[in-house]
Image (cartoon, rainbow, N blue to C red):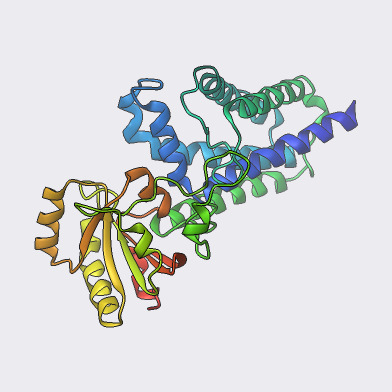
Amino acid sequence: MKFLVQLIRIIVGVLFIFSGFVKLVDPIGSQYKFEEYFSEGVLNLEFLIPYALPFAIFLVISEIVLGVALLVGWKAKFTLRSLVVMILLFLFLTGYSAYYNKVTDCGCFGDAIKLDPWETFIKDVVLTIFILFLSYKTRFIKPIKQTFLPFKIVLLSLIISSFIAYYVLAHLPIIDFRPYAIGKNIPEGMEYKDDGELPPVHDFMLENSQNDLAPQILKMEKVMLVIISSFEKAEYTGFPEIKKIADQAIKKGYKVYGVSASFSEIIQLAKKKYQLPFEVLFCDETTLKTMIRANPGVMILKKGTVVDKKNWKDLDGLEL
């Protein structure tokens, strides 16, 4: 019995740490997922949408810290009670998604591992059983040392997790699991395979008032895409930097396009105010948010391959 408890303890702890980490490196992705859950068409809790990001960060960091606490044996009863509350929340969300087919990807493992709703729900059922089992066997869960070491390790995990969250929010994800990561070729990501699944890159269109320019843009040697998913929600303090880097790129022979899901009226006002030297094409907002976790942000393409991308705050490090 003691061996079984320790084995399940390790499995649960490692799973929570892994699940938390792959979301921690991209907390904005979790924000979008909770916004989807809170939307009118799902849980109809739209008043919570403004709090989706802090809620996501709190939950993700809690996953890591509680996973670490379980492994080192810090306050076993408190840790397991907290894990029970968390897994019941996950169980409700994934069960709701699976039964009503509302959110087809819960984002439990971020963009690293994709599970369908029923696979995710079954995973959470198993985890719930494991955690409840451990809750009844807490006497077998001892700290790794009868000192302050377990607390120090848990505190360190909290500090490191908080720093990572702050860093990636100020810049870009430190690990990019999405199909627009640096080194990925967008045309290859658009190819259909024999498995019948949607390709990782879909709904990728760069449209002007008449045509989809994506096919020709993806063949160009030197392209800069200035991605402003929403002009209404953009960080306008970054627009002078955007103009500066766009001017430099044009001088070096790049074809520069803005890309947004906003309406033309606000685009024209912003272009005039900040003297942005590029045409702004239309693209689906979800696609743009997947391409880069910045608003605005810059992506460099070479014949359809992503060679670099930066948050507007980091444009000094962009090599042209």
In x, y percent, where is residue 207?
Answer: 27, 53
Query: Against 19, is 36 above or below?
Result: above
**Picture mark count:** 0
Residue placed at 76% from the left, 19% from the top? 136
Residue 269, by quadrant, is: bottom left
Q: Is residue 43 left or right of residue 132?
A: left
Q: Nearer the viewer, residue 303 or 24?
A: 303
Residue 67, by quadrant, is: top right
- Location of the N terminus (image quadrant): top right
Query: Against 152, is 137 above or below?
Result: above
Q: Is residue 242 left or right of residue 76?
A: left
Residue placed at 72% from the left, 21% from the top? 129
Q: Nearer the viewer, residue 103 or 318?
A: 103
Query: Against 209, is 90 above or below?
Result: above
Q: Residue furthest top?
A: 99
In x, y percent, where is residue 82?
Answer: 60, 27
Query: Against 39, is 282 above or below?
Result: below
In x, y percent, where is residue 312?
Answer: 32, 64
Residue placed at 71% from the left, 48% from the top? 149
- Location of the C terminus (image quadrant): bottom left
In x, y percent, where is residue 188?
Answer: 52, 57
Q: Nearer the viewer, residue 306 or 196?
A: 196
Residue placed at 76% from the left, 21% from the top? 133
